[in-house]
Image: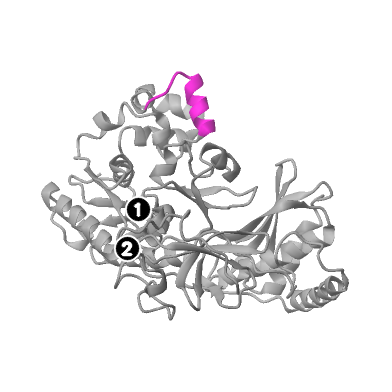
Amino acid sequence: MRPAPTILHLDMDAFFAAAEQAAKPSLRGKPVVVGGIGPRGVVSTASYEARVFGIRSAMPTAQARRLCPNAAYLTPRFTLYRQVSEAVMELLHALSPLVEPLSLDEAFVDLEAGGVPPETAAVRGVGEQLRRDIRSATGLTGSVGLAGAKLLAKIASEAAKPDGLMVIEPGTERELLGPMTVRTLPGVGPATAETLRRAGIHTVAETAEAGEAELVRLLGRAHGAGLYAMALGRDDRPVVAERDAKSISVEDTFEVDLTDRTRVRSEVLRLADRCVQRLRAAGRSGRTVVIKVRNYDFSTLTRSETLRGPTDDPAVIREAAARLLEMVDTTGGVRLLGVGVSGLADFTQEDLFAQVATEREAEEAAAAAAAEPAGGGTEPHEADEDRPRRWHPGLDVVHDEYGAGWVQGSGVGRVTVRFETPWSAPGRVRTFAVEDPALRPGEPLPLVRGGPADGQSSEPAILPKSLSPEPGEDTGSEVGEEISSR
């Protein structure tokens, strides 16, 4: 524990949803939900306006739609989020060489390592300036927590939301933590909370009063001792600049349960290839291949195989994933599949025999797939040139005549686009045929002029004059909508 609050925790406010509101003037101040938009989608982030209706992260999108049917439900745009995240992380690295990113929108910073005086006034000033710099660079807001330990800094930033700053002075930890629910402490999930509740423990103060011996009896040596230390506000974990990933994985949820065994195998092989792409992008290899299968009844199975050595060879990983799939009964229907690699390393050990065998199997599978009649799948992986393009809500588009905009919705052969940019007034809405040759996918525009991604896109950066609203003109979605004759 440090004698001064020199550990900073930054958490961007409703990051994905806030970025979409900043990019789309017509959505500012309105409920926005980002995540899977299909019937089996899950909410990734909800704006504060949407949270008023009870919408939360990890909630099924179908339930969110029932709670707030008039919210904007958008597909995530990770290209934009990464660009904004890079700009924020650059500001953090200017404060200290010790920055520990936890996700795209969250990180710890060791201000003491950056030369900031260990005084409350100094660290508070740094935190306030950081918030101003983030708003200037990205147009978004972030909440800052400052404390003498990582646990407390994170709790402080959560208490400061939205768009605030909180400092926890060393020596006040127990007074602050005491009234909080035990779920506030890291590692206390529903199961642990229920175990503690049955023992009459509900708050952090009651957890500390129970004593280490009682917590060890209830939860085991490691978990009980760790929880007791956190209840006292003790956390000596350092800020670590590089955090090693323990595994790399990808998964897909399907709109309709997969029952065809050949289709299931094809999806597993495709996921294995995607996993290898992420593995190679991280410069890593892995020794253990894992598949995840969620059945129609939500039961989830995992199977794993440890190879003789670490590899990033797609053929080897595909072969292992295919072998693992043979151990799982999928006849009832599969709603989710995943492939992952753990036991990560920085070198590879090739298995040429497995590679040759798998390549042969892949060729045979491809030949069999080519012989199947078209239209049997539920996902857009088939190479069907006659099928209309899919325009997901929220994605960037560019029209030859009207310029940059974003998809509001699509269906029955039509796609509705609102033409506006982050720096324009709310734009007009127009509808086109999905095959309109003048409409094409676009790239994210910077949220502020001169901000992240500025100059990286060759697409129009301003609203065309034909769509610029006149002073006092109503630009709501119910006005200005028309069907293109193209």
Q: Secondary structure at mark 2?
A: helix
The residue type indicated by label 2 comes to Val
Relative to residue 315, is residue 380 depicted above or below? above
The quarter of the rendered structure image containing the C terminus is bottom right
Residue displayed at 45% across by 71% down:
404
Label 1: how many residues lie within 10 Å, few (<14), some (14-19) or many (20+)? many
Where residue 160 sits, quadrant-wise, is: top left
Where residue 25 sits, quadrant-wise, is: bottom left
Residue displayed at 46% across by 67% down:
405
Residue position for label 2: 88
The residue type indicated by label 1 comes to Met
Check residue 212 in the rendering and tell me which mark sits there, or answer none: none
Disc on the earlier residue, 2 or 1: 1
Residue 265 spot, x, y in % from top left:
78, 62
Q: Main secondary structure of the magenta part?
A: helix
Relative to residue 125, is residue 64 depicted above or below? above
Q: Secondary structure at mark 1?
A: strand
Verify whether residue 201 appears in magenta.
yes
Residue 272 spot, x, y in % from top left:
67, 66
Residue displayed at 71% across by 71% down:
316
Magenta range: 190-203
Marks 2 & 1, CB-CB < 8 Å contact: yes
Residue 103 visible in the current orientation? no
Q: Is residue 70 left or right of residue 41?
A: left
Check residue 12 in the rendering and tell me which mark sits there, or answer none: 1
Residue 198 visible in the current orientation? yes
Where residue 206 sits, quadrant-wise, is: top left
